[in-house]
Image (cartoon, helix red, strand yellow):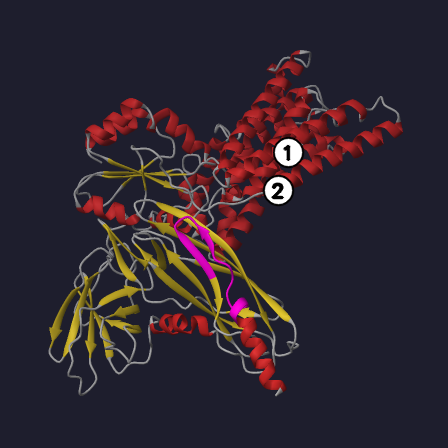
């Protein structure tokens, strides 16, 4: 009797708590539903994130096809619980000519198995939380998200089913591809096609309805191409055009759909994983996505020269100037000092550059080994890191404006860290010079960096050492031969004016970093940067007003504490409210179109010349090239008159799509400029620094 009463109570509880309240974002309503009314310790159970999708809109499968983004579920579960991956229902072809994507319309259930721990005490309630993110598209695409939670009781009795949604779960399972089928499959290459042969079981007397194959990986077949279906003896053939931008396919993995429960009872889709044979022909690597061979291998010493020269030229790039101009001021201040002291400062500055380059190299190697798409300038894709730089440059500018003073000697950026003889300041100057140099790519750097990333760790560190030595060489030269400094005017009042001018340069750098930050975060985060700057300014003013050396000890300590509190409050208020956003479109006008490999392939197939701008908001070299060349009206008219399609590949967030494209050209940094003339098999790779005559000559010669 007691057991029956418990089951009735659980059943009544299930009617209310086996599903969470739906959450709507845009054109999709998301809902978290449990298949059972309770949780039994150690017994896996299934939940579903159900999407109701407005008419004519769609979300995406695990492979989105030509364009899109797969749905993602991020779980927050109690300790000891584990969540499996999404059990993807088979998709449908969504045609938006000339592209074909794979996804879902109307309604889709994403099933996930949850396993609770064995020692779960009965009688408690457990809350499951999940954050769902998706992309919903019609004529336009919009990101969506929902935070869903569900509370279920724990019972040591067999869980009662959620009868209200039993049919929905059964239908969702019927839409999952089966792996149990009596059919057999083989795959082979025939020139530029992959051919899937489907052999029915013995005694099959039906007819296979027109099937479609959906690969798990993107660059296997041309999604928009027709899949040719025909009889082949007692079986069937499905011929699919190979995506020339992908690697040679060794295994064919994906889902085949067909109507009529032909694969197994109640199943319209089957998952396959078969080896691809070569008996029918071979496949050559093509150029559909503008992929090209890796850059020719040269002796190591050539890459070291490239790295040194690139680092040397980096001193002239706009990212580095605000910091290094301050270092030059420190040389001015040291002009009357002993040769040994000046030489020590030069060595320590160079050590700061060298060690920071080694740290960058190590981080980059670790990230790449972990499968990350990180490349040169990777840290500037982190909103937190960019925010820290904004705060640092703003405080440095306040120091130069005289709002507060730290230390007595102007030893360049990092003077506030002055140690014995100001050597700590020189070291920090070199360290910071490296950090702010990363938004720029100097000529010859791209080739050296690409070689470094694709070689051994030891060789990579040699390349980064060459870059560091090139960046620090002018300062080593000046410090080793201080006679060169004698031509600089003697220290005097003019230095105070110059110091304040340098402050405006640092403010300009902070403004540019804020612009970069705005492309990495939701707009709601931007107002908190203003709050941070206000509190930093207030803290700096308090430090200058009551923390000055002429104040009494108690006043100084109190002023410094208040200043630290204000500055800490400002920084934490901004950091804790950072809301990252997904990748933004690279182009928002009618001139530059967003880059996709498929678009390049389609344009080249039509015989249209293509110019690709690989860029990022944090890449100052990219922005200078845009303003000086690519956005000038006469250059735009020249592109238009020559019928050139202009594509922008935005790498602001260092997404894998653009990283893969860069890698196909043997690069891992921006800017990169690629031009395909009409009918050309190989592209022209332009230098990192553009000029209008360069573009005119390029189009005039036809590449």
* Residue at the (23%, 27%) spot, across then down: 638
Magenta range:
15-31
Q: Position of residue 40 (x, y in %)?
A: 57, 78
Q: Position of residue 402 (x, y in %)?
A: 70, 20
Residue 568's quadrant in the figure? top right
- The residue under label 2 is 575
Residue situated in front as seen by the camera: 14 or 663: 14
The span from disc 1 to disc 2 (Cα, nearest Å) is: 9 Å
Callout 2: few (<14), some (14-19), or many (20+) C-alpha neighbours within 10 Å?
A: some
- The residue under label 1 is 532
Q: Earlier in the sequence, mark 1 or mark 2?
A: 1
Callout 1: few (<14), some (14-19), or many (20+) C-alpha neighbours within 10 Å?
A: many
Quadrant position of the N terminus in the picture: bottom right
Residue situated in front as seen by the camera: 449 or 526: 526
Residue situated in front as seen by the camera: 211 or 443: 211
* Residue at the (65%, 12%) spot, across then down: 494
* 37 up-or-down from 553: above or below: below
Q: Are marks 1 and 2 in contact (CB under 8 Å)?
A: no
Element class at badge 1: helix
Residue situated in front as seen by the camera: 53 or 327: 53
Is 26 included in the stretch rendered in magenta? yes
Q: Position of residue 119 (x, y in %)?
A: 65, 78
* 209 up-or-down from 534: above or below: below
Residue 541 visible in the picture: yes
* 152 up-or-down from 330: above or below: below
Residue 39's quadrant in the figure? bottom right
Residue 484 visible in the picture: no
Element class at badge 2: helix
Q: With 119 as the anchor, is 68 left or right in this view?
A: left
Residue 473's quadrant in the figure? top right
């Amino acid at each position: 009797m007691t057991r029956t009463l418990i089951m009735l109570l659980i059943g009544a509880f299930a009617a209310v708590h086996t599903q969470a309240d739906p959450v709507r974002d845009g054109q999709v309503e998301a809902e978290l539903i449990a298949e059972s009314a309770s949780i039994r310790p150690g017994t896996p159970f299934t939940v579903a994130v159900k999407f109701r999708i407005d008419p004519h809109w769609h979300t995406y499968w695990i492979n989105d096809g030509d364009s899109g983004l797969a749905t993602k579920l991020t779980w927050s579960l109690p300790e000891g619980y584990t969540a499996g991956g999404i059990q993807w229902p088979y998709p449908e072809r969504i045609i938006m000519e000339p592209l074909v994507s794979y996804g879902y319309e109307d309604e889709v259930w994403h099933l996930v198995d949850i396993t609770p721990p064995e020692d779960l005490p009965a009688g408690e309630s457990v809350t499951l939380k999940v954050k769902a993110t998706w992309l919903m598209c019609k004529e336009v695409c919009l990101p969506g998200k929902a935070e869903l939670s569900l509370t279920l009781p724990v019972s040591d009795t067999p869980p009662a089913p959620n009868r209200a949604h039993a049919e929905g779960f059964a239908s969702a399972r019927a839409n999952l591809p089966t792996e149990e089928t009596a059919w057999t499959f083989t795959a082979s290459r025939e020139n530029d096609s992959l051919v899937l042969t489907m052999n029915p079981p013995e005694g099959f007397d039906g007819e296979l309805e027109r099937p479609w194959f959906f690969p798990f990986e993107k660059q296997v077949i041309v999604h928009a191409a027709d899949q040719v279906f025909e009889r082949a003896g007692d079986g069937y053939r499905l011929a699919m055009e190979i995506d020339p931008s992908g690697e040679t396919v060794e295994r064919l993995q994906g889902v085949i759909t067909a109507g009529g429960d032909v694969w197994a009872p109640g199943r319209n889709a089957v998952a396959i994983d078969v080896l691809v044979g070569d008996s029918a022909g071979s496949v050559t690597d093509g150029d559909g996505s503008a992929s090209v061979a890796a850059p020719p291998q040269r002796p190591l010493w050539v890459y070291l020269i490239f790295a040194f020269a690139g680092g040397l030229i980096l001193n002239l790039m706009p990212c580095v100037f605000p910091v290094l101009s301050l270092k030059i001021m420190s040389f001015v201040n040291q002009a009357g000092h002993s040769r040994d002291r000046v030489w020590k400062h030069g060595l320590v500055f160079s050590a700061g550059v060298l060690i920071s380059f080694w740290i960058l190299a190590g981080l980059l190697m670790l990230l790449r080994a972990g499968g990350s798409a990180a490349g040169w300038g990777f840290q500037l894709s982190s909103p937190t890191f960019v925010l820290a730089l904004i705060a640092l440059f703003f405080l440095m500018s306040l120091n130069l404006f005289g709002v507060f003073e730290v230390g007595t000697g102007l030893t360049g950026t990092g003077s506030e860290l002055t140690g014995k003889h100001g050597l700590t300041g020189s070291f920090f100057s070199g360290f910071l010079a490296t950090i702010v140099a990363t938004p720029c790519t100097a000529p010859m750097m791209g080739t050296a960096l690409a070689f470094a990333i694709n070689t051994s760790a030891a060789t990579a560190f040699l390349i980064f050492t060459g870059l560091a030595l090139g960046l620090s060489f002018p300062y080593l030269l000046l410090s080793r031969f201080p006679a060169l400094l004698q031509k600089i005017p003697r220290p005097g009042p003019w230095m105070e004016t110059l110091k304040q001018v340098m402050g405006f340069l640092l403010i300009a750098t902070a403004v540019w970093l804020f612009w970069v930050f705005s492309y990495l975060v939701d707009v709601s985060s931007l107002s908190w940067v203003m709050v941070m700057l206000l509190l930093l300014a207030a803290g700096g003013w308090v430090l200058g007003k009551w923390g000055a050396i002429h104040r009494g000890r108690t006043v100084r300590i109190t002023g410094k504490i208040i200043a630290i509190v204000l500055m800490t409050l400002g920084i934490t208020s901004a950091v804790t409210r950072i809301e990252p956003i997904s990748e933004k479109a690279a182009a928002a006008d009618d001139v530059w179109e967003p880059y996709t490999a498929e678009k390049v392939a389609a344009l080249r197939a039509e015989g249209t010349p293509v110019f690709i701008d690989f860029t990022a908001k944090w890449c100052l070299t990219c922005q200078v090239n845009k303003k000086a060349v690519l956005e000038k009206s006469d250059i735009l008219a020249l592109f238009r008159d020559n019928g050139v399609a202009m594509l922008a590949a935005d790498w602001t967030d260092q997404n894998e799509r653009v990283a893969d494209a860069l890698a196909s050209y043997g690069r891992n940094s921006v800017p990169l400029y690629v031009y395909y003339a009409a009918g050309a098999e190989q592209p022209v790779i332009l230098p990192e620094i553009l000029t209008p005559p360069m573009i005119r000559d390029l189009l005039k010669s036809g590449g």
